[in-house]
Image (cartoon, grey):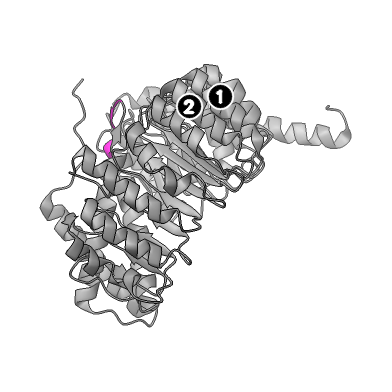
Amino acid sequence: MTEQTEWCLSADQRKSTVSRVAANIATIAFSQGQQISGADADRAAENAERKAYTVARVEAQTTTGVRPHSETYEAYTRKLAALVLQAVTQASKQAQPATQNGTTTDSHAVDLTGDREFLTSETTEQALAAMLAPGSTLTKIKLSTKSFGIEAAEVAARAIENVAESLTHADISDIIAGRPEKEVLGALQIISRSLAKAKLKALDLSDNALGQKGISACTQAFAQQPALEQLAFENVGCSINACTSLAELLENTQELRNLRLYNNMSDDAGAAAIAKILSRAPKLEAFRMASSRVGSAGGIALANAMMAGKCLQRLDLSDNPMTGDVAEALATMLQHQPHLRALNLNDTSLEDAGVSTIAQALANSAPELEELELALNEVTPEGAKELAAALATKTRLQKLNLRENELEDRGVILLSGPIQSLPALRILDLAHNQVRRAGAVAVSKAVADKAQLELLDLDGNEISDSAIDDIKTLLKKAGKPSVLGSLEENEPDADDDEEDNQEDAADTEVKSNSVVDKLTDLLGKTGLTS
């Protein structure tokens, strides 16, 4: 099998995207009664595309290789759309345009994100002029993509101290690129010392090569913050020792609501250390520890620790080899999280037994669930049975990701019934599941009437050309000709006769299930069932 190359876009593709985005920004702004010049639209489009492309390139990487191109492209377009809306909103608020040094400012924030640059004391003075101004009351700063040495850090520290009374959000992700270790640690200490004088609600230290030494250097920024609500250490080399240090140094966690770790090498022991933080965070609403080499022991420790509260809304433990051994602990925890809205367990080696256990827990809990992701878990039709029962209760579900499993026609047909009862469904991903005509047609019929449907992804399956034509016709008649995703990796099976027979069997099974459901309802009303 040929190894998949890393996702990227050519310079011409990116230039074309920027051109289209600039036109969209200008059009949307005009439709809202706002004026934005062509130069400002171009500048905002370039900035948005650059940020989105950077995010996508990061998302493309996993600890075991690269993600499917379709997933990475989806992340790119989603981020780009969000940044376009943000650009229009900023224009409507008459935010000051980006200056030549890449700084954007308004009355409450400074954002240095832009072209990479090694800052000197002089260029830092220019970039942070708004923060250094007497009486400045900025509440948010973002220093990302600028590299700070000792001298630049000293200027930044002076600027931070000048706004310390009002500062609540500090994003110092990606601020030390290309510097030698001694300078890195010194710069981090200087900036962290100044942040200690602010009462932060949010702190992001992601995308810095920290390791244990870096965590220690940043201690003053987070260790004794009395009301810290959001904390991020994504892609920072948070090893076992670094996780242990973080757990020991982070003293105040009672107000912590959002903790994000991603693409680290934490392993089970590191996860156990992070679990100690979670056990002291009863208000936790969002937790991410994806792509961190967490196994079953670490996963169980994390699940048990999250029992400390009942506020969890978003959980992402994707791309960790936890296996089905973690399922029981996760299931128990999920049953105590009534506000859960998003669960991402992609690529966690759960297999049928693990997915079934999780599904059983979700069937009677998480009534507000909007996103469920179980891709790359080797789920077969056997695992689809319990999953189908769980989906039947999730009327708010908007996204269901089951790509790269082994559902085949039988599994997809089992899921088609409950999928048909999901009124809010926007995204359904069943790519690479060994699906042929019967399953593909059945699920297409199930989603055809979804008013909010944006994407039906059936790529990488074995759907015949005639079945694809039938699906396109079906969706066109339903007024949704554009929701079917790319089929570039589909490998058509020409045996339509056999598939037609399977489709007939599928229709019979779906009808039979419907009859059983109706009969059960009637018996329940008469008291003849328990």
Residue visible at 44% across and 32% down in the picture: 245
Residue visible at 21% across and 45% down in the picture: 177
For badge 1, the amino acid type reads: Ala
**Side of 514 where 70 appears, left or right:** left
In the image, residue 467 sits, relative to residue 383, either above or below, namely: below
Span colored in magenta: 64-70
Residue 23 locus on image (x, y percent): 24, 70
Q: Which residue is mark 2?
A: 271
Residue visible at 41% across and 67% down in the picture: 163
For badge 2, the amino acid type reads: Ala
Could you say which disc has been placed on residue 301 in the image? 1
Q: Quadrant of the C terminus?
A: top right
Q: Quadrant of residue 364?
A: top right
Element assignment for label 2: helix
Q: Is residue 68 magenta?
A: yes
Q: Quadrant of the N terminus?
A: top left
Q: How far apart are labels 2 and 1 at the CA level?
A: 7 Å
Cβ–Cβ below 8 Å for labels 2 and 1?
yes
Query: 262 or 470, which is in the foreground?
Result: 262
